[in-house]
Amino acid sequence: MNISLLAKHQKLFSIACASLTLSITLGIGLGNAKPLADISWLDIIGEGSIALLSLLWIFFILVSRPPGKVTSALIIGLSCILFTANLDLVDEFIYYQEAVSWLSMIESIPAGLGMLIMSYALYQWHQEQLILNKQLQKRESNFRQHQQVDFITTLYDAEYMRNQIDTELQNKAQPDFSVVMLDINNFDLFNRRFGHELGDNLLREISDLILMNLRATDLACRYAGDRFILLFPDTDLEVAQKIASQIKRAIANIAFKPELSADPVYHQLTFAVESAKFGDVTENILQRVSRRLELFKQGQTS
Ligand SMILES: Nc1nc2c(ncn2[C@@H]2O[C@H](COP(=O)(O)OP(=O)(O)OP(=O)(O)O)[C@@H](O)[C@H]2O)c(=O)[nH]1
């Protein structure tokens, strides 16, 4: 839930408010109050809860979803339902005059329309989720654990990678996966020159570039500081090396422009690759790839 999202939904917020006020003023303005004895409190509870829940749903959608087609359709659909629910609620307290009996006849139309719009919104939401799932695939393997997500890059952390390597080792008698460790060169210098906040932005941008260059089955995690770790299932050393080189080239060719400056800063990565061996345990693989990376960093050869 993100209350600041409300500011991005001013139009949708106005539509929901308009539906609320219009239904109440229409109902009250065109009718006369019922005597207390004629009021059915059971109906009020039923119809009131529909109106209240529609309002709650509108609120939670507005503070949870970014602007877009799906959010708009959900709010417009719910506002129509809210309109009918409110008219229903209000007419528990009033009698309509003869001249406006049409109001009772048409009051359920917005709800029907709202359900139709909501159905369209839910279908679009489903399509949106399919696309998001595809993007998520490279960020997570077959297990979801949100506490293990790195706050800055939104990649999973080292612990998650350890669990995934454990799973790979347990699943196969002869392990056939490779692991790549990547480190940004001179990241400390970048931090000192441009500040930590821009350093965080750079980590995010590099994570996105890494993800773009992975295959659907690969997994990227943030290992520590300016270090990332990748898991390539069913992949030998040679192929892993090739993909890591593509990532390194992609990042080396991107012109990062910190502080709205037109002067680009280019970044180099150093990486090391290791393949799992028969009888390996996770920590051995991580130590090997980390040691190899340190060697490369000293010579800056990869
Ligand atoms: N902005 C930002 N900086 C971080 C974060 N985590 C670690 N760092 C910084 O990353 C830098 C890592 O420094 P080093 O390990 O010396 O890495 P380096 O400067 O790239 O040096 P080489 O790897 O030898 O090229 C330090 O300045 C840390 O403060 C983070 O989450 N955000």
Image (spheres, helix red, strand yellow):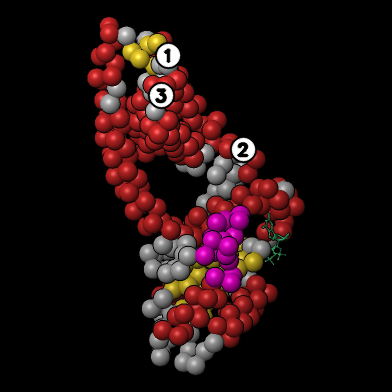
Q: In which quarter of the image is residue 183?
A: bottom right
| Quarter of image, res 147 | bottom right
Q: Nearer the viewer, residue 101 or 119?
A: 101
Q: Name the residue under label 2.
A: 260
Q: Can residue 121 be seen in this view?
A: yes
Distance in Å between CA atoms under marks 1 and 2: 62 Å
Q: Distance between the residues labelled 3 and 1?
A: 10 Å
Comparing marks 3 and 1, which lies closer to the viewer? 3
Q: Is residue 45 magenta?
A: no
The type of residue carrying mark 3 is Ile
In the picture, measured across the screen, residue 79 lies left or right of residue 14, that is left
Residue 44 coordinates in the image, percent (x, y): 41, 30
Q: Earlier in the sequence, mark 3 or mark 2?
A: 3
Which type of secondary structure does the marked residue at label 2 adopt?
A: helix
Residues 120 and 16: in front is 16
Q: Does the residue labelled 2 lie within 8 Å of ligand 1?
A: no
- Which of the pair 140/285 is nearer the observer? 140
Q: Is residue 197 left or right of residue 90?
A: right
- Asked whether residue 213 is in view, the answer is no
Q: Mark 3 points at which residue?
A: 39
User: Pointer 3 and pointer 1: residues touching (CB < 8 Å)?
Assistant: no
| Mark-to-mark CA distance, 3 and 2 | 64 Å
- Point out the tag, 1 or 2, that comes first from the N-terminus: 1
Please report whichever mark, 3 or 1, sits nearer to the chain's N-terminal start. Answer: 1
Q: Give the residue number, with chain letter if any, for mark 1.
A: 33
Q: How many marks?
A: 3
Q: In this view, does 79 lie above or below 281?
A: above
Amino acid type, label 1 = Ala
Q: Main secondary structure of the magenta part?
A: loop
Residue drawn at the location 42% of the way across and 30% of the way down: 41
Q: Where is residue 104 in the image (x, y as percent from the top left)?
A: 28, 19
Image position of 40 (left or right of 10) = left
